[in-house]
Image (cartoon, coloured by chain):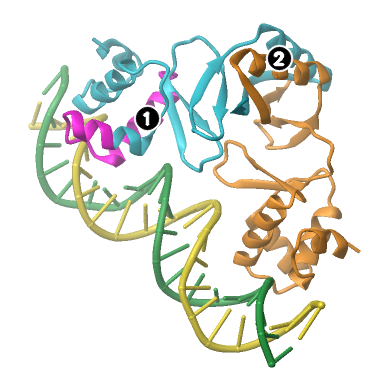
Chain colours: A cyan, B orange, C green, D yellow
Amino acid sequence: MKGIEIKNAGLKVTLPRLSVLEYLANHPGEHFSADDLFTKMRLENSDIGLATIYRVLNQFEAAGLVMKHQFENGQAIYELDTGEHHDHIVDVDTGEVKEFINEEIELLQQKIVKDFGYQLIDHKMVLYVKKI
Amino acid sequence: MKGIEIKNAGLKVTLPRLSVLEYLANHPGEHFSADDLFTKMRLENSDIGLATIYRVLNQFEAAGLVMKHQFENGQAIYELDTGEHHDHIVDVDTGEVKEFINEEIELLQQKIVKDFGYQLIDHKMVLYVKKI
DNA sequence: CTCCTTGCAAACATTTTGCATCTGC
DNA sequence: GCAGATGCAAAATGTTTGCAAGGAG
């Protein structure tokens, strides 16, 4: 069960928190808005509230359990943080999101910020694409 | 004057549109939210409305005159589109935004999406940094 | 003169917060 | 039993839209 991760985050192990974490874990590689989760979790089982989903996602993000993204759609998108860093490809026609990683680019980014006199804390790269 | 660019976008050359475009042109390399523009333009001269700023910025974005960005702050940020593509470095402590471009990364991005069977429409890279 | 544009206020969409109730430990 | 968590409704935030009045061509 996912209880340990929640406890390690300093949070009580409650049903809504477990539900959110398990829902995300059961849908690896997928990306959900808070409202997506609300609608789908309501259908599947629970009587969770939307405000709780927002609160829980924020707590999980602070704890490093989930990642939050802002693509161009206005609403934030969440996914489980598996620890493996990756960037995103968004199909502008379908809205489909895929993941990728490229070591060469990662190294170039380090070099760029060092040249500016900074250290890299985080980064975000999104490629907007169409099918050929 | 900036009137020609507005006319070329198929829009009437009006005072609010001129004011926004000139304000951006007079502050090159800076990045503004709609509300930033509203507040600062009200102070400087005009009696422009916030809704007009949003409408004008959207029209200018569609016309390719300005670029719109979503960093992690919730509100959209606009800057003049000079035609020279660049990416962004955001200092997480100060909020300061700098611009950079790296040809090698641009080429790698093309290669990545081609390997996925896509064509690259647009992309966005933001490096979040701290001073060393 | 006509159509497009404006400013204002109201509507909207997303996210956060206040509060009484409920739950995990 | 108590501190913390929940659901709901209300508030807050950022952006868009309806509309009567104003302005460009």
**Which of the 4 image quadrants contains residue A39?**
top left
The quarter in which the N terminus of chain A is drawn is: top left
In the picture of the structure, the residue carrying the numbered disc 2 is B111
Q: Chain of mark 2?
A: B
Work out how far the residue at label 2 is from the one at label 1, CA to CA, in angstroms. Answer: 34 Å
**Residue lying farthest top?**
A103
User: Residue drawn 70% across and 19% down?
Assistant: B109
Q: Quadrant of residue B49?
A: bottom right
Q: Nearer the viewer, residue B129 or A31?
A: A31
Q: Judge whether B67 appears above or below B56 on screen.
A: above
Which residue is under mark 1?
Answer: A57
Q: Amino acid at mark 1?
A: Leu
**Outermost residue, front side:** A132
Q: Secondary structure at mark 1?
A: helix
Q: Which region of the structure is painted magenta?
A: A39-65
Q: Most extreme residue toward the right, as rendered?
A: B1
Residue A34 located left or right of residue D21:
left
Q: Is residue B72 left or right of residue D22?
A: left
- Asked if residue B92 is positioned above or below residue B78 in the image, the reply reads above
Q: Observer-nearest residue: B7 or D21?
A: B7
Residue neighbourhood size for the residue with mark 1, other residues' Cα within 10 Å, grouped as few (<14), some (14–19), many (≥20): many
- Please say if C2 is above or below A57: below
Report whether B99 appears left or right of D22: right
Q: Respond whether the residues carrying marks 2 and 1 are from the same subunit.
A: no
Q: Report the residue at 73% width, 52% height from top.
A: B63
